[in-house]
Amino acid sequence: MKEKLRQLHSDSLVRNSFYLMLSTGIMAVLGFIFWLISARIFSPEDIGIATTLISAMNLISYIGLLGFNSTFIRMLPTSKNRSTEMNTGLLLSTGAAIIVAAGYVLLVPIIAPKLGLVHDNFLYAIGFIIMAALASVNLLTDSIFIALRAAKYNLLIDGIVMSITKLALPFVFVGLGAYGLFAAAGAAAVVALVLSVFFLIKHFGYRPQLSIDTTTLQGVVKYSFASYLANLLNIAPTLVLPLVIINHLGAAAAGYYYLAFMVANLLYTVVYAVSQSLFAEGSYADRGLRDLMKRSSLVIAAIMIPGVTIIYFGAHLMLTIYGHSYVQATPLLQTFAIAGPMVAIYTIANVLLRITKQTWAIIIVNVVYMTAISGFAEAWANRGLVWIGYAWLLGQMLASVVALSFLWWGWRGRRAPAV
């Protein structure tokens, strides 16, 4: 057993996948405790405003990535000038997030009047912009550690330090009301960023500079743009589905959907963690994709098969924990569980397209993914909540078929003899 564990630990794909899964699990558990604590010391109104601000910060930070999260994982493993490339991406991401966050603050009176505190108070506005921008940079440093086969720092920084810091800060900022709760989440991300930069400097030879290298930018702009657009298309269904459900089935159904998806997402996290590790490993020139695919498939199958079984047959019991009314979402959760293997195929196929730099294919696949899930959901929502699950499953299947087709054609093109 010790020898087997030693072999698994020496496999960077398995090791980093494990660190990412463990980090996500710890963040989920401590995040749950964070909201339990917050519910004790903040009013429901404060929590409602704070969660909206936190969601806005998360969305802005994601928009600010500009695709460099994928670009770093793909390019840094074989780069000979990492510091220059990292500085270019980090600075551009910071600038983009600042612009988007400032625009959000200016538009708050129009799009979200109840969040007027970040518009009316100058210090609150500056704090929101700064924290949103630095949260975006923190997401990029996560990608850098993955690219450098050092996901243990994701576990240490995000899973442990950031999560524990976030638990303590509500008591510090309790006097600021809703903004204090938002600041607790934002400040924890800033602490994580500072620690990330420290480790990058100390252990990876990173040299921070306020400079953007145009040569580097020209070399990655096409790939970054394709990745950026694909990422936005990829997250679109998770933003669209709640709106579709509210419009067709009401707010209560949206709540049932949210909890069912959160439970299913624990299963999908396995796929996301392994796919990120596969992305990083496949970007190194010293390992073949076929071997990596076998290892990735084994890791996913070892967790996915029992996970799907447990969630499918235990869906009713799991939802009962949240309240008797939530058992209405049992068929939906079971459908999400059945979709697990298709989520794995779609996600891994996307990673392979990114590794092989099939930029147009990446965009087309995610267009199919977004339009299929959103379109089917809009068409079927009136039939009941479980049909949202069917839309999710069928969208995953169609996008997987398209992605695998592109991979097959690319493989045949590389195998074809020169004329």
Image (spheres, grey):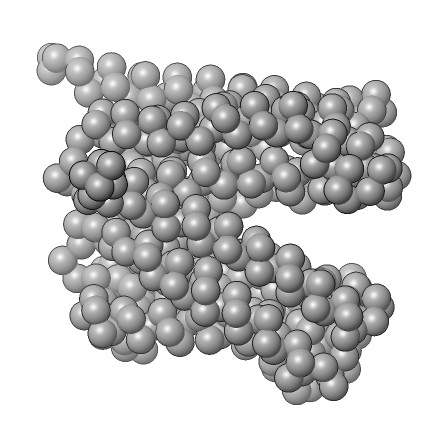
Residue 254: horizontal and vertical position, in percent?
79, 41
Q: Is residue 357 above or below residue 368?
A: below
Q: Nearer the viewer, residue 289 or 377?
A: 289
Does 165 sit left or right of 404 as displayed? right
Q: Give residue 166's quadrant in the image.
A: bottom right
Q: How many marks?
A: 0
Quadrant (top left, top right, bottom left, bottom right) of the N terminus: top left
Quadrant (top left, top right, bottom left, bottom right) of the C terminus: top left
Q: Is residue 44 visible?
A: yes
Q: Nearer the viewer, residue 306 or 328?
A: 306
Does 400 sit left or right of 55 as displayed? left
Q: Is residue 367 above or below residue 207?
A: above
**Which residue is pictured at 44% across the width and 54% down the height?**
23
Q: Is residue 12 visible?
A: no
Residue 246: horizontal and vertical position, in percent?
83, 40
Q: Give residue 331's quadrant in the image.
A: top right
**Which residue is pictured at 46% across the width and 17% down the height?**
401
Does 107 sit left or right of 114 as displayed? left
Residue 414: horizontal and vertical position, in percent?
19, 20
Q: Nearer the viewer, residue 198 or 379?
A: 198
**Which residue is pictured at 39% across the width and 20% down the height?**
404
Q: Give residue 263's quadrant in the image.
A: top right
Q: Is residue 183 above or below residue 160?
A: below
**Which residue is pictured at 86% across the width and 43% down the height?**
251
Does 409 sit left or right of 190 as displayed? left
Q: Is residue 235 above or below residue 80?
A: above
Residue 399: horizontal and vertical position, in percent?
51, 24
